[in-house]
Image (cartoon, grey):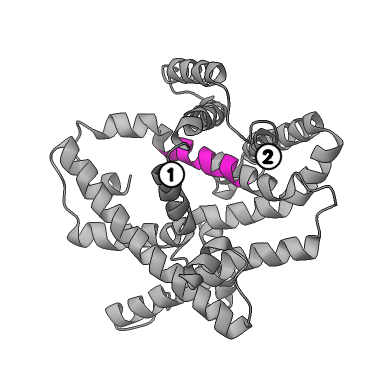
């Protein structure tokens, strides 16, 4: 998508890639579903009620230290590169949006000193805040949680968030059903769906890809995200048998947050200045892999640095496994 924005693509390959990903919507849906599943994996099977203070502390430590470290480093880099501090026309008080990591999410409706995290970071923080409520409803009635999430998701469609400069795709309320689905899924299909269920999901996906664009695009992408998640769950049952594959995904997930924070800024800075336009499909994927490796390398360094700083400044081990393991080795 970034290559398309900066005209670094060939027309022969982009239509297929954008269609497969629903112009970015499918990956977004997978992120939302996976976020709900990951939280439920930790808290769903505990018999005692969630301790809100401890929950908030873990979420804060898992999100903010690495975000702040990355932002400060890039802020210094841009100051040196430009010869002056960025965002000189923005009032200082607006940095509160950045301190809270909501600058990217609020950017469509408010001028902010945004650099990293995109809209997704503030968006997912809101969903994290809603998780204890969904968990409480789930423990009384799983069906009740899904009905509640569905009804809440319908509200933005009626009130048209576009009037505020936002879209349904960046609305936490509109994506609450996907988040709740991830919670429900991990409790009932922790080991993945069966082969029969996976095949059915794959067939339905193939059929839905033939549905033409229309006002139903958003709910269609939600359903396709759920089906993709089911297919991936089915395939992962076989992939996880390989220790090499398990270790690969463990490592990539360990440093994925650092890579996520850095990748969009890096691509926006690098592609218009130094990017190239591969003319073959093989060259396109090879170039993409080189960029991914470079981005993950920086994510690795940022994560390790954050782990050291958290230990030295707060005198505690980072709560997030990726920072703790990075700090250890």
Image coordinates for residue 297, horizontal then vertical, percent: 34, 63
Above or below, comparing residue 58 to residue 185 in the picture: below
Residue at image location 26% in from the left, 61% down from the top: 270
Is the magenta region chiefly helix, strand or loop? helix
The alpha-carbon separation of the residues under discs 1 and 2 comes to 26 Å
Image coordinates for residue 239, horizontal then vertical, percent: 44, 35
Above or below, comparing residue 294 to residue 14 in the picture: below
Say which of 25 and 114 sits in front: 25
| Mark 1: secondary structure | helix
According to the image, label 1 marks what residue?
243
Which quadrant of the figure contains the C terminus? Answer: bottom left
* Viewer-nearest of discs 1 and 2: 1
Image coordinates for residue 69, horizontal then vertical, percent: 48, 74
Nearest to N terminus: mark 1 or mark 2:
2
Check residue 34 for magenta coloring.
yes
208 displayed left or right of 63: left
The residue at the far left in this view is 279
According to the image, label 2 marks what residue?
183
Q: Which span is picked out in magenta? A: 24-35
Image coordinates for residue 148, horizontal then vertical, percent: 77, 35
Above or below, comparing residue 127 to residue 302 in the picture: above
Say which of 136 and 246 sits in front: 246
Q: How many marks?
A: 2
Q: Quadrant of residue 193?
A: top right
Residue at image location 73% in from the left, 37% down from the top: 152
| Mark 2: secondary structure | helix
């Amino acid at each position: 998508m970034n290559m398309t924005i900066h005209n670094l693509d060939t027309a022969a390959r982009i239509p297929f890639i954008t269609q497969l990903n629903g112009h970015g919507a499918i990956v977004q849906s997978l992120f939302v579903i996976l976020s709900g599943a990951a939280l439920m994996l930790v808290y769903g099977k505990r018999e005692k009620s969630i301790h809100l203070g401890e929950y908030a502390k873990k979420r804060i430590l898992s999100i903010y230290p690495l975000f702040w470290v990355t932002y400060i480093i890039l802020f210094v880099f841009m100051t040196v590169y430009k010869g002056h501090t960025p965002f000189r026309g923005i009032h200082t008080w607006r940095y509160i949006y950045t301190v809270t990591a909501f600058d990217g999410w609020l950017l469509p409706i408010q001028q902010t000193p945004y650099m990293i995290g995109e809209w997704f970071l503030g968006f997912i923080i809101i969903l994290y805040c809603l998780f204890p409520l969904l968990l409480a409803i789930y423990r009384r009635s799983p069906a009740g949680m899904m009905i509640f999430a569905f009804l809440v998701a319908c509200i933005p469609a009626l009130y048209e968030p576009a009037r505020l400069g936002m879209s349904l795709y960046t609305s936490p309320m509109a994506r609450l059903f996907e988040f709740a689905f991830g919670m429900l899924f991990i409790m009932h299909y922790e080991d993945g769906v069966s082969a029969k269920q996976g095949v059915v999901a794959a067939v339905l996906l193939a059929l839905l890809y033939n549905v033409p664009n229309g006002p139903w695009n958003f709910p269609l992408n939600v359903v396709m995200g759920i089906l993709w998640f089911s297919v991936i769950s089915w395939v992962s049952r076989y992939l996880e048998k390989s220790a090499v594959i398990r270790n690969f995904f463990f490592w990539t997930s360990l440093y994925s947050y650092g890579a996520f924070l850095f990748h969009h800024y890096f691509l926006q800075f690098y592609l218009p200045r130094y990017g190239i336009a591969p003319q073959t499909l093989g060259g396109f994927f090879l170039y993409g892999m080189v960029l991914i490796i470079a981005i993950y390398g920086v994510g690795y360094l940022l994560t390790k640095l954050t782990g050291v700083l958290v230990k030295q400044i707060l005198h505690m081990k980072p709560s997030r496994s990726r920072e703790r393991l990075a700090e250890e080795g």
